Image (spheres, helix red, strand yellow):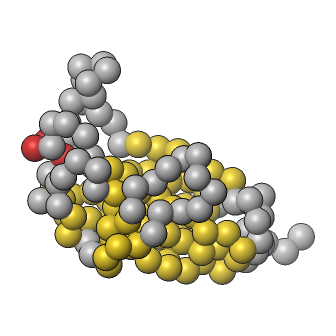
Amino acid sequence: MAKKKLAIKMVSYGLYTPFEKEAKGLPELMEFSTTIPARLGVEFGYILNIKGGRGELLEFRIDHPPFINAKTGEMAEPFDGEFYVRTSDFNFFLGDTFWEPLEDKKGKWTLTTWWNDQEIAKKVFTVE
């Protein structure tokens, strides 16, 4: 059986309107940027368009500066997750926002997405 081929394009990256999990749409791009202000409510990340990937599993990771997880009191690990592509022409948002204290969120944030163990997207943001 032939290996599936996806068409993947990074549509946008930078600052977005707040992401709402219950909303049907994705956040809207406010500004292309890899320099992100450390402010409460700031949403940043990227949107990928994936064609021909219905039912495929995407894996992602958000690497962030070292900070203490308020729930456990220990250093927060990178955030890992997975997501199934829902349609044959699908837009996927990977991003994050900030919370108190802001000071320990400053530094490099690297957002990466994989499909079948292949890196398909990566963007480094500097939070200052």
Q: Position of residue 91 (x, y in %)?
A: 61, 69
Q: Residue at x 15, y 36 (%)?
A: 101
Left or right: where 3 falls relative to 40: right
Q: Position of residue 2 (x, y in %)?
A: 84, 74
Placement of 66 over or under 92, stated as above or below: above
Placement of 121 over or under 105, stated as above or below: below
Left or right: where 28 falls relative to 41: right
Tally of marks: 0
Placement of 5 over or under 26, stated as above or below: below
Residue 92 in view: yes
- Judged from this view, the residue extending furthest toward the top is 72
Left or right: where 125 falls relative to 93: left
Residue 6 in view: no
Placement of 93 over or under 101, stated as above or below: below
In the rendered image, which quarter contains the N terminus? bottom right
Q: Residue at x 54, y 62 (%)?
A: 26
Q: Residue at x 18, y 52 (%)?
A: 39
Q: Residue at x 27, y 46 (%)?
A: 98
In the rendered image, which quarter contains the C terminus? bottom left
Quarter of the image for residue 9 reads: bottom right
Q: Nearer the viewer, residue 23 or 103?
A: 23
- Judged from this view, the residue extending furthest toward the right is 1
Q: Position of residue 97 (x, y in %)?
A: 32, 50
Q: Position of residue 36 (x, y in %)?
A: 21, 64
